[in-house]
Image: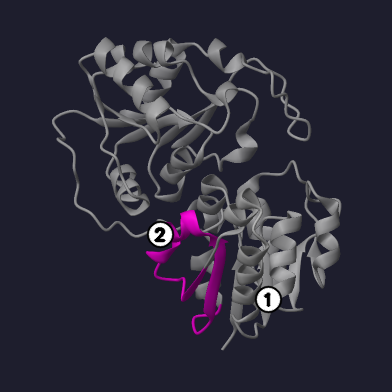
């Protein structure tokens, strides 16, 4: 039996865009035992996955924020106690994830020094994969796992993958009209499409629009949208497993470059991702999962934190693409 540890600590979008590898590992090694190492906040999402046999939830961010050595040592002890593994794969490529992988054991695999943002991380790996950092994130994840385990994860099979996460909750929608989920938040302000322009998009569509929010600032923007158009309503506050099911039952998702938006691709649901300072590298484009980007010339190796060009995306163009996806054009 192959014992495999996957290290992907954060963030939500990165975990969503890497969890698809689980079905391919189990396809090639059906008797394997897979342990996933992540930050505690994302553990509930991976806990529901049938191919994750063991989950190691860390509190590294909390230890750093509190500057707590005792909490840090507790995390190290936790990693050391996981046991022996045939292969430990760091899919993140940061120093903290590389060190975490090396603490688990010596059979580590990750990206080489020319393929990651923090080249020092590569020195903690026993073997490495070479793939440009600017390459598509899904293909990068497929490459590092397939190299580590000696398996093949072809692009064509990724295109025909099974939904990544199980759907545990019933359909919440009234289907007299298409249900479109809008993801209005993001990790940085310049990745957020203006709420006023989202109102224009919704007003062009004959749909039920559901606005997902994750904090009080996003809830305030969601309320603004709902007050501007009767077609929009606030989505409920949801746990990660509930969010997966909510998106899985939607007819379309439109959102910024952020974790919940990427869930649509993971669950094989149609989606439109709106890009400003980032680009389609962050998604796996398919006929039903498309990106719309601003006029900005993006250098993914040097992201411009002052690039607020996302606001220049034409709402009419977004609505037109939404209609095409909804009606199968």
Residue at image location 78% in from the left, 35% down from the top? 301
Q: Which residues are magenta?
A: 29-56
N-term-proximal mark, 2 vs 1? 2
Name the residue carrying label 2: 44
Vertical order, 92 against 132 (above or below): below
Residue 59 in the image: state x and y as whole percent: 56, 60
Q: Could you tell whether 42 is left or right of 222 in the image?
A: right
Residue at image location 44% in from the left, 41% down from the top? 260
Element on which disc 1 rests:
helix
Q: Gap in Å between the C-alphas at discs 2 and 1?
A: 22 Å
Residue at image location 50% in from the left, 32% down from the top? 290
Q: Quadrant of the C terminus?
A: top left
Residue 303 in the image: state x and y as whole percent: 73, 29
Vertical order, 252 against 90 (above or below): above
Residue 231 visible? The answer is yes
Residue 323 visible? The answer is no
Name the residue carrying label 1: 104
Q: Residues within 10 Å of mark 1 (few under 14, many from 20)?
A: many
Vertical order, 14 against 192 (above or below): below
């Amino acid at each position: 039996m192959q014992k495999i540890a996957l290290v992907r600590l954060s963030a939500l979008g990165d975990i969503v865009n890497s969890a698809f590898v689980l079905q391919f590992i189990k396809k090639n090694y059906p008797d394997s035992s897979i342990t996933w190492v992540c930050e505690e906040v994302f553990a509930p999402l991976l806990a529901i996955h049938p191919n994750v046999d063991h989950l190691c939830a860390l509190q590294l961010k909390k230890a750093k924020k509190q500057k707590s050595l005792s909490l840090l040592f507790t995390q190290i002890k936790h990693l050391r106690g996981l046991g022996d593994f045939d292969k430990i794969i760091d899919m993140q490529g940061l120093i903290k994830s590389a060190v975490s992988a090396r603490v688990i054991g010596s059979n580590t695999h990750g990206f080489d020094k020319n393929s990651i943002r923090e080249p020092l991380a590569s020195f903690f790996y026993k073997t490495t994969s070479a793939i440009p950092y600017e390459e598509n994130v899904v293909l990068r994840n497929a490459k590092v796992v397939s190299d580590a385990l000696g398996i093949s994860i072809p692009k064509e099979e990724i295109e025909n993958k099974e939904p990544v996460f199980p759907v545990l909750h019933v359909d919440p929608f009234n289907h007299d009209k298409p249900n479109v989920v809008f993801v209005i938040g993001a990790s940085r302000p310049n990745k957020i499409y203006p709420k006023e322009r989202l109102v224009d998009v919704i007003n062009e569509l004959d749909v039920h629009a559901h606005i997902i929010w994750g904090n009080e600032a996003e809830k305030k923007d969601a309320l603004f949208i709902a007050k501007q158009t009767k077609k929009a309503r606030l989505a409920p506050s949801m746990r990660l497993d509930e969010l997966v099911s909510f998106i899985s039952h939607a007819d379309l998702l439109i959102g910024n470059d952020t974790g919940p938006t990427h869930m649509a691709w993971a669950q094989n649901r149609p989606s439109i991702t709106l890009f400003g300072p980032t680009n389609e590298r962050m998604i796996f484009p398919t006929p039903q999962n498309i990106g719309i980007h601003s006029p900005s010339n993006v250098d993914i190796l040097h992201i411009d934190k002052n690039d607020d060009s996302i606001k220049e995306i034409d709402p009419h163009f977004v609505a037109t693409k939404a209609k095409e996806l909804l009606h199968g054009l």
